[in-house]
Amino acid sequence: MWCSLLYQISGIFTDVVKQKAELQHGILTQCIKRITVERKCNAQVIGSILLKVNSKLNGTNHKLRDDLHCLPKKTMFLGADVTHPSPDQREIPSVVGVAASHDPFGASYNMQYRLQRSALEEIEDMESITLEHLRVYHNFQQCYPDHIIYYRDGVSDGQFPNIKNKELRGISAACSKLHIKPKICCFIVVKRHHTRFFPERSSYRNTTSSTTLLRETVVDRTICPSQ
């Protein structure tokens, strides 16, 4: 892996580093601004950079615990989103990104991306994307998953049927080609509020910020009505 120290923030220079190293030569990179090293080099920043490096090197940054009773064995997590161009640039294609886990803890992952018709939210090439992810999973685990948990972001209520009819069918078709029948569960992640939370007591605060809540804080009342 190659770490690049940038003297100033420059999107063009970063693009060149990524294209030359990763696309042409297959060398993973981690770009760091010089100002970050000279002025902001504290334990939190170093830890954040190392987490990025570790994940790029296929390491495990986190896991629940070794004896996972809450997670079915042989589970692959899929996560997908689509990025669209601005309304005045409809000649530019939309970008599909789908990540998938290939370890028992759902912490190590690989990625597939595709370009598709501009402003189209449904993923057209879900079958081939899933096939690639299943092959990677098999290479690491020497078996195919018995469970697939699919997380989908950026979908409105009116698009739910399209996700079911196109993307879930694509996942099922990929499994059929490999002659496997895993159980598939789909979660569509939506945000229905604009509430921001701030700690009232010092015991609720993150150690690195006076306005940030503690990690793993769960809000399950008032703004989240039970159904």
Image (cartoon, rainbow, N blue to C red):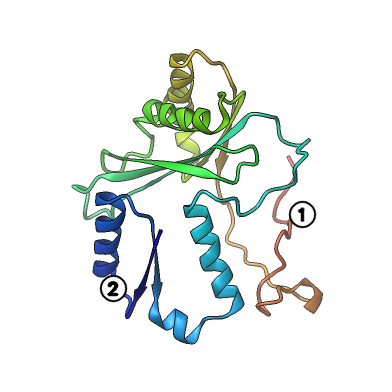
Q: Give x and y (percent) for residue 206.
A: 70, 73
Q: Quadrant of the C terminus?
A: top right
Say few, some or many: other residues with alpha carbon within 10 Å of mark 2 (under 14 / 14 to 19 / 20 or more): few
Total numbered badges shown on the rendered structure? 2
Q: Let me know if residue 155 appears in the view.
A: no
**Residue type, mark 1 in image:** Arg
Q: Which residue is mark 2?
A: 10
Q: Which residue is mark 1?
A: 221
Q: Give x and y (percent) for residue 184.
A: 58, 25
Which quarter of the figure has residue 125?
top left
Q: Earlier in the sequence, mark 1 or mark 2?
A: 2
Q: Give x and y (percent) for residue 5.
A: 36, 74
> In the figure, is residue 148 to the left or right of 69?
left
Which quarter of the figure has residue 86?
bottom left
> In the figure, is residue 159 to the left or right of 63?
left
Residue farthest bottom in this picture: 39
Residue farthest left in this picture: 91
Circle 1: element type: loop
Cα–Cα span, label 1 and label 2: 44 Å
